[in-house]
Image (cartoon, grey):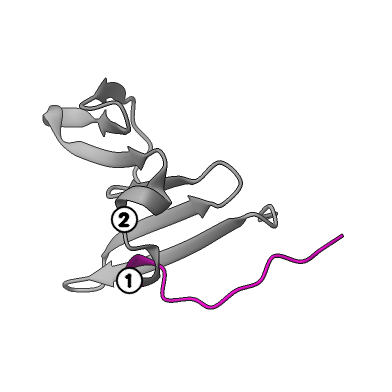
Amino acid sequence: MNIPQNEIRCMYFMGSGRDKVNIVYNDKTDLLYIRLDDRKQDVINRRVSEDIVLDIGEDDRIVGIEILDASRRVTLDKILPIKYEVAKT
């Protein structure tokens, strides 16, 4: 997988270890995406506020959450417990 330099990816395992949450943060666009269900499925985007979009999947379940201007809305160092530097090229 080729991850852009401005993107951070984390994976958290919950419960029995079979359920995983994927978190992607793009510091260039300040967008945080939390994927709650990694199965391939059709989703409907539902904007719930100016800065938050929910991906609704099968059985009307939330499968993803997109947060715009994430650094102003979420304490990123609590969600992304990674120290990093973006390489200068």
As measured in the structure, the alpha-carbon distance from the residue carrying label 1 to the one carrying label 2 is 9 Å
- Residue 11, located in which quarter of the rendered image? bottom left
* Above or below 85: residue 55: above
**Element at badge 2?**
loop
Residue 20 x, y percent position in the rendering: 30, 62
* Above or below 78: residue 22: above
- What's drawn in magenta, residue-wise? 78-89
At 77% from the left edge and 66% from the top edge, which residue is drawn?
87
Please, what is the three-letter code of the amino acid marked with disc 2?
Val
Q: Which of 82 and 63 is in front in this view?
A: 82
Please say whether residue 80 is one of the residues in the magenta stretch. yes
Residue 73 x, y percent position in the rendering: 31, 49
- Residue 56, located in which quarter of the rendered image? top left
At 46% from the left edge and 53% from the top edge, which residue is drawn?
24
CB under 8 Å between callouts 1 and 2?
yes
Please, what is the three-letter code of the amino acid marked with disc 1?
Lys
The residue identified by callout 1 is 78
Q: Which of 51 and 58 is in front in this view?
A: 51
* Above or below 7: residue 56: above
**Mark sitting on residue 74:** 2
**Element at badge 1?**
helix
Number of marks in the rendered image: 2
